[in-house]
Amino acid sequence: MSAFARRAPRCFWRSFSHGLLLLISAFSLDRAAGDTGQGATSSQIDNIKNAFVVNIARFAHWPQQNAAAGNSPLRLCMYRSAEADQQPKALQQMIAGRPVDVTHIDRLNSPEDCSVLVVPGGEIDHFRANFLPLWRHQPILTILDLTTSTQGGKAYSGIMVALVRKGSKIGFEINLDEVHGAGLKMSSELLKLATLVKGDN
Amino acid sequence: MPPSLPYSRLITILAVFYLLPVNSWSNTAVAEAEDFSSMSLKDLLALEVFTSASLLPTQESKAPGTVYSFSSRDFRRFGARRLEDLLQFIPGIQLNQYRKRHQTAWARGLLSRYNDKLLLIVDGVRMQHLYYSHFALGDNLPLENIARVEIILGPASSLYGANAFGGIISVTTRNFSDTPQFEASVEAGNHQRSKATATYNSRTLQLFGSTLSQDAPFDGERRSFIGGAAPQPLDEDYTSLFVKARPLAGLTLALNYSENNTPFLFIPDTQDAFIEERMLTTSASYEAGTIATGRIEARLFYTSDKTHEYEIERQSRALAYSENQHATIAGGTVTGLRQFANHVVALGSSWQYEEAEDMAYRRLFSFRNGFFETPEQGSLLRDANIRNNDYALFVQDVWTLTPSVELTLGARYDDFDQFGQHLNYRSALVYTPTSNQTWKVLYGTAMRTPGFREYLKVLEGTDFSPPTPEPEEIKSLELGYLYQWEDANLSIGLFRNKVTGFIQEMPTPDGIDEYFTNIDGSWYLRGVESVLNLRLAEKLNLRLGASFLDIEGSTSQPTPYLADWTSSINVDYSINTSDSLGLSLIYNNNRHDTNQFRDDQAEAFIIANVFLAGEFNRNFSYAAGIDNVFNTRVFDPAADFGSQHNTERGVREIWLRLVWSYGH
């Protein structure tokens, strides 16, 4: 005889009504959340990556002309980010005593006000075409997000830091040639935690 | 009698939590209780972010499956000391205490007396006692050595082959550390519990050892599976030794040894019964390359399983019964991964070998007839030296159709010596329209081959010749939705499983012994599972899990051992930056009480746990807790043979753990 069988109708309907309550409640929650107008907030994974960006930037040192900016906001530019029009909480921090001003940009032609530039992995071709010819070796900390493309382990022209996958975790790689070429410096504490990459491609 | 929360009140509480105005917490709450911006880089690097459900590192919310993962940080957050403690927080999993020492995880209603409908993988190596096709998830697997536990519900035979039937439990031990690290812990509790662990970790070598002695957390009022007294001793001990080395880049060698001596818990008072287990697993893993340019992952393993069960007649203290379940399991897997434009393809092959070494039994006593003049002896199996091979090929393609749509297609072909050829497949469509919501549709199949005991058991005292059971099969359709707010997330999953040829233990026609056979027809399991994480205040986090299960079968017999509603609540309060206080509640609704015992406790139950964890200073930390605070009594004796299942829960446990670490 089977241990698995049809349940008594009464029990089923009572359970079903509770299941329906769960579903209705969940959808109420979903709907109510939509009403708050928070449609494009950061996901947890984005929060983690943003925390990486801020932490890495904290260990970077810009050349004098940039540091002379005093307490003016440090502009963190996010190129073609999915989070346009948002100020992610993880980025609302101070870097080198300066508040962070997050700017979402769609063009790479004039990033001169950016101290940090975050580039999604899928935009590397645009980055190469539009940023490199004019802005390579400028004091802009360039960070490439490779966590969505399973790549890593190699250097990209113009990219100083790459966020990469390390198994089930996120790690980061630093190309010191690009860092030094732009006149930036990285703390030794940061370099201890990073994987250093070199390359000519 | 401890107070128990009425079912209706619990439902009301759940409903209130769900119907809380979102505005009241949406600006303050968190997903997974982390304020990442305040974490150091070192802590961020240690965060577990991706899942390996598809063989590829994948963001958990986008994984092509229903994935629940727990890091060592979560062990503390949930007050867990054993892997089975974590399973209580998985919607869709019900734990059942068997009359032996282990708890069985019933995933989405897949009943069994042993953990044979799930697959346990430790660092990529399948862990299994061959005779019962079983693994235990208790103190035999010390959490102190585990970095991450990933539970994937739903069929996964398209990647993992036989037994990935109801899902897989993937355990990852600690990674190597860049700097030398030392850690030692001691734990004490009631039930004579004393435990000690020691760890050394470095860039190329890792050593871990643990020893535990205690009485199983049950009391003298427990009942045997036939309802009478169960006065047997409860003392038990567990020992583990784990060595991992990386002699070359990409090459990892591991040795995992465990030794457990545990009692039977709920057997009649004529005998004491015990299990002695010695399991040694060695493995070699090699990984090289990147997915972009081509990656290879290879693994070889060998496991020697020496299990001995025996009974002592209580009056004479003489040996009443003894059996060995010694077996060997070995195998290897090679997987290649490569990205081609929008496709990431995995292609692999695997081989598994299993052999029965010593399955001898000796019966000297029967509770009906007393001691025999001449002991009965023989093999537990009709083929005492059975050897099997399973060869498999598998392929998987993760196709990124658009930046927001990913399609996973996979198939695996197995060729079993005993059970012929089988093809299993899986497809998953994951749609991420915005960064904060994900939709999933999954369809897949799985199969489970009968274990040694199920198709080779020697029947005693009967001439009945049982048929050989065929592999059981499952087809599963799942729908999933995840919404991520700034400070909360909600996941809802619906599933519909069709199980065909379910293997069940049946009495022989003469009623003298029992055998295993496939049931006729199919039965259907449907359910809803949901998890809500939210931050109620800056330091206060809540996790709420709930599941509903409905079963429709081909016969009219009720299913008395499954709860159709289960839920869990976990509250975590940060007292300060280093100390936290937690509370968890585990709820199962009432099940049908089918036996004739009037003093059992078969009603709905809530188990409450409280726990505290923190740091004295940089090198010393602590954790303490009370499991089953109200000593809630759960027991519902059943004959525990065939299709019947005993229901029990442990009694109150009070514990304290101190940890010293250096170099972290």
Image (cartoon, coloured by chain):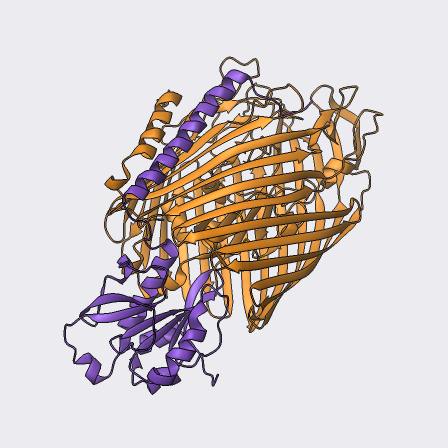
Chain colours: A purple, B orange
| Residue in the picture at 40% in, 71% down | A144
Q: Where is residue A172? Give x, y as percent.
A: 41, 70
Q: Quadrant of the C terminus of chain B?
A: bottom left
The answer to whether one can see residue B534 in this image is yes
Q: Where is residue B56? Give x, y as percent.
A: 55, 60
The answer to whether one can see residue B602 in this image is no
Q: Quadrant of the N terminus of chain B?
A: top left
Q: With B222 as the anchor, is A43 left or right in this view? A: left
Q: Quadrant of residue A26?
A: top left
Location of residue B276 with respect to A110 vertically, above or below: above
Q: Quadrant of residue B568?
A: top left
Q: Where is residue B480? Give x, y as percent.
A: 49, 43
Q: With B384 as the anchor, is B177 left or right in this view? A: left
Q: With B150 as the anchor, is B642 left or right in this view? A: right
Q: Quadrant of residue B191?
A: top left
Location of residue A42 with respect to A155 vertically, above or below: above
Which residue is at the front of the view, B33 or B82? B33
- All told, the count of numbered labels is 0
Q: With B581 as the anchor, is B444 left or right in this view? A: right
Which residue is at the front of the view, B328 or B423? B423
Q: Where is residue A70? Give x, y as percent.
A: 14, 76
Which residue is at the front of the view, B566 or B149? B566
Location of residue B46 with respect to B540 vertically, above or below: below
